[in-house]
Image (tube, rainbow, N blue to C red):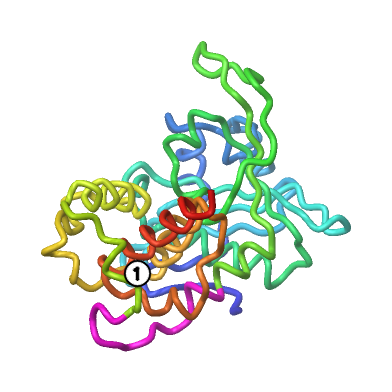
């Protein structure tokens, strides 16, 4: 991978002196401070703390637009002997809640696993932050440690969480979501009609869950079977989020086979796959 990873919509640029003012303003904004390694910077120590114990970091910028950054991605507290580091992403207010800036996180994680002998990448957060941040879970991070009531945040006790992403998990997700899609006639995935419910209530509820995972408004997805033949118009990050969503909601605990995932090209395909896994789970009990 090149020294400056990029996608169609976002690029990762090295942190330079001209970025310091904006990054300091971001560090003292109203959002949480966990992205800075549980350390609240101050004007005198900010630049030093920005580079302390850092493995790699980049500012995120939209491709083909003004030079102002969307935020920063950081890998800190590395231990390359044991094969781990910590990851954080801090976004400007206008970029939070949008799905596409997370492409920068995917690029950065791939950069880290490609460049360094990392086995796991960890992130520090709180229960409250994780509840409002689907990005970490959509990228494949899973909770590995919890200290109950460990932190006092704005007068409330919060759980301190360690979430982790393994090289094996990321490699599996990357290879499947980045594989080329298979062209085929619509509704030819081979998933049986019998796994579709008779009314639209189950379908609409599933679309609500899918919209939340993809960070879309429910109105952006089909609401009934009559609209389910619509093709999936997802960017690369949303394909990854779809894969994680299907696997995390699968009661059988199975991964989505790469060959099958490549054929899911309509919302109807995705719903049939979900229903099939639910039926298989019920049949196994």
Image position of 120 (left or right of 269): right
In x, y percent, where is residue 40?
60, 30
Asked whether 97 or 264 is in front, the reply is 264
Task: Say whether residue 100 is left or right of residue 142.
Answer: left
Mainly helix, strand or loop, the magenta region? loop
Magenta-span inclusion, residue 185: yes
Q: Is residue 268 left or right of residue 134?
A: left
Q: How many marks?
A: 1
At 88% from the left edge and 58% from the top edge, which residue is drawn?
Answer: 81
**Residue 220 position in % (x across, y down):** 18, 56
> Can residue 18 be seen?
no
* 142 in the magenta segment: no
* Residue at x 39% of width, y 45% of height: 92
Please identify the quarter of the rendering in which residue 110 is found.
bottom right
- In the image, the segment drawn in magenta is 175-188
Vertical placement of 52 versus 117: above or below? above
Q: Quadrant of the N terminus?
A: bottom right
Residue 48 in view of the camera: yes
According to the picture, the residue beneath numbered tag 1 turns out to be: 235
Residue 195 falls in image quadrant: bottom left
Front residue of 108 and 120: 120
Relative side of 197 to 80, left or right: left
Towards the viewer: 267 or 132: 267
């Amino acid at each position: 991978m090149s020294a400056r990873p990029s996608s169609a919509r976002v690029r990762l640029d090295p942190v330079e002196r001209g970025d310091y003012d904006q990054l300091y303003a971001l560090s003292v904004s109203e959002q949480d401070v966990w992205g800075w390694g549980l350390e609240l910077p101050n004007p005198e120590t900010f630049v030093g703390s920005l580079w302390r114990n850092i493995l790699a970091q980049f500012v995120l910028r939209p491709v083909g637009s003004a030079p102002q950054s969307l935020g920063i991605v950081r890998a800190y507290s590395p231990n390359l002997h044991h094969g781990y580091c910590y990851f954080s992403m801090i976004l400007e207010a206008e970029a939070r809640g949008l799905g596409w800036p997370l492409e920068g996180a995917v690029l950065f994680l791939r950069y880290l696993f490609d460049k360094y002998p990392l086995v796991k990448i960890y992130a520090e957060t709180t229960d409250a932050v994780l509840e409002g941040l689907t990005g970490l879970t959509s990228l494949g991070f899973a909770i590995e440690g919890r200290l109950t009531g460990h932190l006092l945040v704005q007068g409330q006790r919060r759980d301190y969480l360690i979430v982790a992403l393994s090289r094996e998990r990321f490699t599996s997700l990357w290879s499947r979501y980045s594989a080329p899609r298979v062209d085929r006639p619509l509704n030819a995935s081979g998933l049986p009609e019998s796994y579709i419910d008779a009314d639209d209530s189950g379908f609409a509820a599933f679309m609500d869950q899918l919209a939340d995972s993809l960070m879309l408004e429910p109105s952006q997805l089909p609401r009934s079977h009559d609209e389910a033949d619509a093709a999936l118009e997802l960017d690369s990050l949303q394909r990854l989020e779809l894969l994680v969503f299907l696997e995390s909601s699968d009661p059988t605990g199975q991964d989505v086979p790469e060959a099958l995932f490549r054929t899911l090209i309509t919302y109807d395909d995705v719903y049939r796959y979900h229903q099939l896994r639910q039926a298989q789970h019920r049949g196994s009990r």
